[in-house]
Amino acid sequence: MDQGFPAQHTTTTTVTTSTTTTQPNIRFDSSYIRTLPGILKIVQVVLNLLGFICITVSSYHTSRGEWFNTVAMGGFWFTGILLVFYLFHIVEKFSKIPWLKIEFLFCIIWTAFYLLAASLAVDYAKYVEAYGVAAFFGYCAMVVYGYDAWLKFQAIKNGALAQGQHTPKQVSTMTSPAY
């Protein structure tokens, strides 16, 4: 027998797996609005609505105002519907849909749209004050959508779920060789 090896040894193998836990039932959960993504969606909806109102109540309706309102209402409806989907766990029910990627792309596009729309509105603010106020809300919405896009990118990169959770599970086995 070699002196360098023990007569008996034990091998420990640890396997870590992750299980995805989702509940497929539709239910109302108000706790979502206290999370960062929920707060961001509420802020986005409010900024979209405020910008839209500013352009709408002005007595001047230009193509740049119509573009701003198109961006504002597109953001209002898409973000509002997503907020409802998260509040009622519809996103969790349809977890096969790549929600985070869809939201990431939307947020990137709306960041660019708001940059353009708010810039066009602020250029017209020298004629109509309401366009300047709308531009302020547009730039705020641009920042919020940009930050939300960054959060979605980080979540995609880390393999997170849009709703539901990954539960790590460790399984350890011990084996000894037969002599």
Image: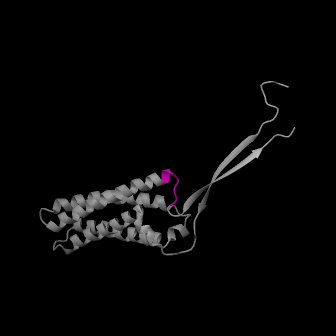
Residue 65 left/right relative to 144: left
Residue extent of the magenta highlight: 156-161
Disc tally is 0
Q: Can you say which quadrant of the picture contains the C terminus?
A: top right
**Residue 131 visible in the picture:** yes
Q: Give residue 75's position: percent from left, percent from top.
A: 35, 67
As drawn, which residue projects farthest toward the left?
127
Instruction: Name the side, left or right, on which 179 lies relative to 85.
Output: right
> Where does the N terminus fall, quadrant-wise?
top right
**Residue at horizontal 47%, vertical 59%?**
100
Image coords of residue 137 (percent x, y): 25, 64
**Residue 74 figure quarter:** bottom left
Q: Residue at x 41, y 68 (%)?
A: 33
Identified at 27% across, 69% down, the residue is 69
Q: Measured from the top left, where is residue 47 in percent x and y?
A: 29, 66
Coloration mode: one colour
Q: Is residue 108 visible?
A: no
Q: Nearer the viewer, residue 113 or 175?
A: 175
**Majority secondary structure in the magenta region:** loop
**Of 20 and 78, which appears nearest the observer?**
20
Q: Position of residue 157 (x, y in %)?
A: 49, 50
Is 157 in the magenta? yes
Residue at 67% over, 48% down: 15
